Image (tube, rainbow, N blue to C red):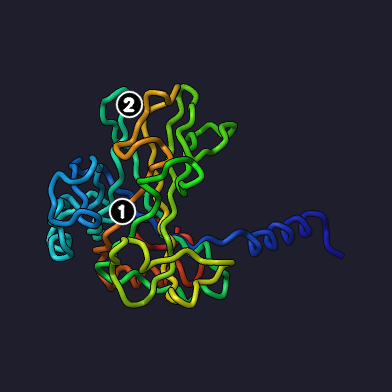
Amino acid sequence: MITSTAATAAEEADAGTRAVRVAEFVAECEFSHRAPDDPIVFPGLPGASHSHSFFGSTVTDAYTNLGDLLAGDSTCEPSVDLSSYWVPTLFVDGEPVEPQSATFYYLGEGVNQDVVGQIQPFPQGLKLVAGNALASGPEESSARWSCLHAGHVNPSKDFVNCPSGTALESYLDFPQCWNGRDLESSDFTSHMAYPVAGECPATHPVAVPKLRQVLRYPVSGDPSGFELASGPGYTMHGDFFNAWPEDELERRVRDCINPVIKCGTDGVPS
């Protein structure tokens, strides 16, 4: 006969084995610099873009190539992540405001469980774009806005009114299915695709980690004075130029993503 104490212990142990598992590692990257440049959309054309806020690589400009990133420095933790990340600058009442934190999650979610173990690292030099800088309305947006520490505020594809003491948040997921050939494409997106019903389409058969961009801005209140350099909140977008060391990214995918383990910035199970 099992005593109540023993039964409770057994139930707790069983609950532990049934705990939700997360395939994840992260990069926490501080703001680096701001410039009207975009080496993916307007390569070699300084000043041709709207204002972007850059994270990670400290050397990114209109002329940046993979070699520049690999030879540069990074604001990220871990510092081995030499990648460049950038987003349209947020303006509040006409003044630029940078995020108080920028977290880039590398996730195994979005694809079926049997696919997670087959996820491969990004090829070095891969360029990704997510969101829609030219969106004419919220229905054309894939970004989400919400408030940190304000669970009663419903997420929206446009700016939200965050209560005092909270922070404005932006979430954006990048595509995670690669065509297996091209590091970029003429329209900036067609070499990548999103999964359909948890599977990568036959045209884009290589599953890579889902990159999730999470930005937290030190602003709250009436969003009528908020504007992105690209326009309204629903034009939020993000760019990623991969410059992770190949062996380090491979290790993190192997040790964190494929076995569905939650890791920190050091790529070690947390």
In x, y percent, where is residue 255? 42, 70
In x, y percent, where is residue 34? 20, 40
State the residue at coordinates (28%, 64%): 186
Tell me if 53 is positioned left or right of 134 in this view: left
Q: Amino acid at mark 2?
A: Val
Viewer-proximal residue among 231 and 66: 231
Label 2's element? strand
Quote the CA–CA distance across marks 2 and 1.
22 Å
Please tell me how crowded label 2 is: few (under 14), some (14-19), or many (20+) other residues with Cα within 10 Å: some
State the residue at coordinates (32%, 68%): 249
The residue that mark 1 highlights is 239
Is 168 located above or below residue 66 in the figure? above
Residue 126's label in the rendered image is: none
In the rendered image, the quadrant that contains the C terminus is: bottom left
State the residue at coordinates (24%, 51%): 56
The residue that mark 2 highlights is 92
